[in-house]
Image (tube, rainbow, N blue to C red):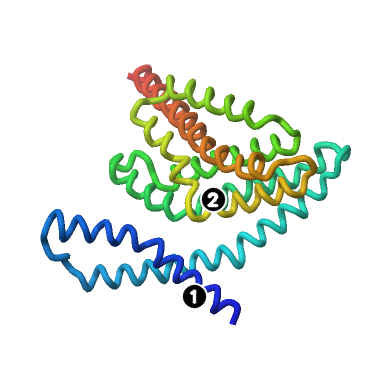
């Protein structure tokens, strides 16, 4: 019965979230364009699928992955007692990298965008390549954020360093990859990754002494946002160097 109640609340929440965008489309379709909605039946079925899918997805996260991640983060963080050395915190750092990488790989937004990028790039950027590089970026961002929380490094120092690094990488990266790299963080931090990262960060901040839930817990999300940009910009530069090396080899062979 409790699960049914959770599903009902999730359904109401999903419908409530979809109402504004449905109203927006309706206004532009009937007021601005002044035309009937084409394929109304197909659109209605699609909306039904969206409601069911989002409801089940949100409910599944809420009753399984998020509580599990929260509990595991608290237990791993508790292993590192003050004065026990950095080795005691190694499990929580590895957990941060693992949860960031795995959650990003199954992020629906990133999967959809990766397929679209493949089509727009003519197959130059393959979906799995993009997803893996972005996932590594999120994992790296979470590792840096976790180490910062464990060591008590001020959030401003790490944030400033990450922003400067992104700016420097932009200067040397291929221009065609810069917009995708800067957008990749927002693409990667969506319906799967953000709830998991937030739950993990809050649990970590609450377990360690003298940590702020707002600064340390939610600060992990911005690290996960900037990490993919760094990873993609580095990958783009490495790929360009590799292509130039191949061209020089072909030129010498000729």
Picture residue at 47% right of the left edge, 34% below the top: 232
Q: Give the crowd class for mark 1: few <14, some 14-19, many >=20 residues within 10 Å.
A: some
13 relative to 246, above or below = below
Q: Where is residue 9 in the image (x, y as percent from the top left)?
A: 50, 71
Q: Nearer the viewer, residue 218 or 246?
A: 218
Name the residue at the bottom extreme.
Answer: 1
The foreground one among 38 and 35 is 35
Mark 2 or 1, closer to the camera: 1
Q: Are marks 2 and 1 in contact (CB under 8 Å)?
A: no
| Vertical relation: 210 (above or below) 63 | above
Report the side of 146 relative to 179 (left or right): right
Picture quadrant where residue 125 is located: top left
Distance in Å between CA atoms under marks 2 and 1: 23 Å
Q: What crowding class fits label 2: few (fewer than 14 Cα within 10 Å), some (14-19), or many (20 or more)?
A: many
Q: Name the residue under label 1.
A: 8
Q: Which residue is drawn at 56% across and 28% down?
A: 162
Q: Identify the mark nearer the N-term, 2 or 1.
A: 1
Classify mark 2: helix, strand or loop: helix
Q: Which residue is drawn at 71% across and 38% down?
A: 149
Residue under label 2 = 194
Q: Residue at x 32, y 48 (%)?
A: 116
Which quarter shows the N terminus? bottom right
């Amino acid at each position: 019965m409790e699960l049914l109640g959770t599903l009902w609340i999730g359904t109401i929440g999903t419908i409530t979230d979809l109402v504004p965008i449905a109203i927006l489309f309706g206004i532009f379709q009937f007021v601005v364009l002044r035309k009937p909605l084409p394929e109304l039946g197909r659109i209605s079925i699609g909306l039904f699928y969206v409601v069911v899918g989002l409801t089940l997805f949100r409910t599944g996260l809420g009753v399984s992955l998020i509580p599990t991640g929260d509990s595991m983060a608290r237990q791993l963080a508790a292993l590192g007692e003050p004065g026990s050395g950095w080795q005691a915190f190694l499990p929580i750092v590895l957990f941060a990298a693992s949860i960031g990488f795995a959650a990003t790989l199954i992020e629906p937004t990133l999967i959809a965008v990766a397929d679209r990028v493949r089509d727009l790039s003519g197959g130059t950027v393959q979906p799995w390549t993009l997803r893996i590089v972005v996932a590594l970026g999120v994992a790296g961002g979470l590792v840096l954020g976790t180490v910062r929380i464990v060591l008590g490094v001020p959030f401003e120092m790490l944030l400033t360093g990450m922003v400067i690094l992104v700016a420097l990488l932009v200067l040397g990266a291929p221009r065609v990859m810069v917009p995708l790299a800067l957008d990749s963080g927002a693409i990667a931090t969506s319906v799967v990754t953000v709830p998991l990262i937030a739950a993990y960060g809050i649990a970590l901040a609450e377990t360690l002494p003298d940590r702020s839930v707002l600064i340390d817990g939610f600060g992990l999300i911005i690290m996960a946002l900037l990490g993919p940009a760094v990873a993609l910009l580095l990958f783009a530069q490495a790929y360009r160097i590799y292509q130039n090396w191949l061209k020089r080899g072909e030129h010498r062979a000729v």
